[in-house]
Amino acid sequence: MPTRYEAILRADREATPAAGTDGRTPLRLAAAQPLCVPLDVAANARAHADAVRAASARVVVFPELSLTGYELDAPVVPTDDPRLAPLVRACAETGALALAGAPVAGDHIGVLAVTGDGVTVAYRKMCLGEAEARRFRPGDTPGVLTVDGWRLGLAVCKDTGVAAHAQRTAALGVDVYAAGVLESACDTAVVDQRAHRIAVTHRVWVAMASFAGSTGGGYTEAAGRSGVWTPQGEVCARAGTAPGELVRVSID
C-alpha cells in the first residue's frame, strides 16, 4: 500500500531532464488528489502544500474546487487570502506552480495559479452544470499559462466534456490540457473517455486531477484515479482511488 502522497511513478524518469530538440527542458508535471475537508480552506491549503512538496514537480494540478470541496455555497477565496500562505511557501521552496480549485471573485468556479510569488486567478470555468449555474457565472475566455516554454490550457470538469472548449483552448497553441475534475466512482470511465478524446483529437498531453474521497453535491464516493495521458491517448501514469495520492511524469 502506498503511503500518503507517495507518487505512482510508472512513467516518471527521475534523472535530471535534458533539453529536447526544440530547446525546451522536459516538464515535470503532477496531478494530485489531496484529502479535502469541507469548507476548511486553511486545512486544505496545508494538504495542497504537502502534495506540492511530495510531487517535486514544476506544475501540480489539483481537482475542481479542491480548496473548499464541492460545496456550492462556499465563500469566494480571495487571491490575498492568508490561509493560502502554506501553499505559497511550498511553491517557493520547490519552484512549483500549483493549479488549485476554488470559488473566485465574480462568482466563478476558478483555477488559482499559485507560485512562490503569490496567487492569481488563471481561469474561470466556462461550462457550468445546472446546479452550479444557480450560484456561479460562466467564464468567457479560455485560459492558457506558459511555463518554461510549455503552454498549458486550463479546464474544469464539465469543460472537458464540451468539444468546443477543447477546440478553443487547443487553438491557442497548447502543449498540455490540464483539468481539475470531479466524478462519482461509478463514472470513472468518463474521465478516461474525455482525456483520450482530447489527447488524440488535439495531439496534446492531458493531465486530469480527479477528486478523491467524499464531498458535497451528493458525491459520497468520488472517482479519484487522477492521471496523465500522452498525445496518442495512452495512459502513462495513474493514481488509485484514495485521497492523498498523486502521479508525476516528465514530458518532452
Image (tube, grey):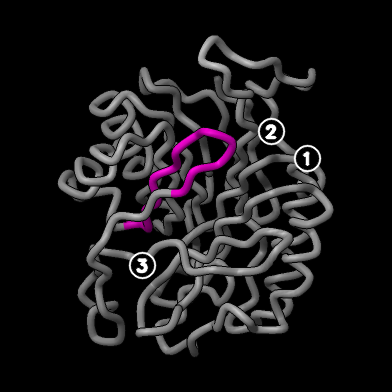
Residue at label 1?
Answer: 2
Any mark on residue 124, and which? Answer: 3
Q: Amino acid at mark 3?
A: Arg
Q: Which is closer to the viewer, label 2 or label 3?
A: 3
Dividing the picture into quadrants, the one containing residue 219 is: bottom left
Report the Cα–Cα distance between label 2 and label 3.
Answer: 29 Å
Q: Position of residue 88 (x, y in %)?
A: 73, 66
Residue topped by disc 2: 8
Q: Secondary structure at mark 3?
A: strand
Going 52% across and 33% down the picture, which residue do you hit? Answer: 149
Dot 2: within a 10 Å radius of its alpha carbon, few (fewer than 14), some, or many (20 or more) residues? some
Q: Which residues are magenta?
A: 145-157
**Residue 64 in the image, given as x and y percentages of width and height:** 46, 63
Side of 90 where 200 appears, left or right: left
Q: Nearer the viewer, residue 9 or 52?
A: 52
Quarter of the image that includes the C terminus: top right
Was residue 87 drawn as part of the magenta stretch in this picture? no
**Count of all numbered marks drawn on residues in the image:** 3
Image: 90 above or below 237 = below
Judged from this view, the residue extending furthest toward the top is 21
Image quarter where the N terminus lies is top right
Pointer 2 or 3: first along the chain: 2
Identity, as a three-letter code, of the amino acid under mark 1: Pro
First in residue order: circle 3 vs circle 1: 1
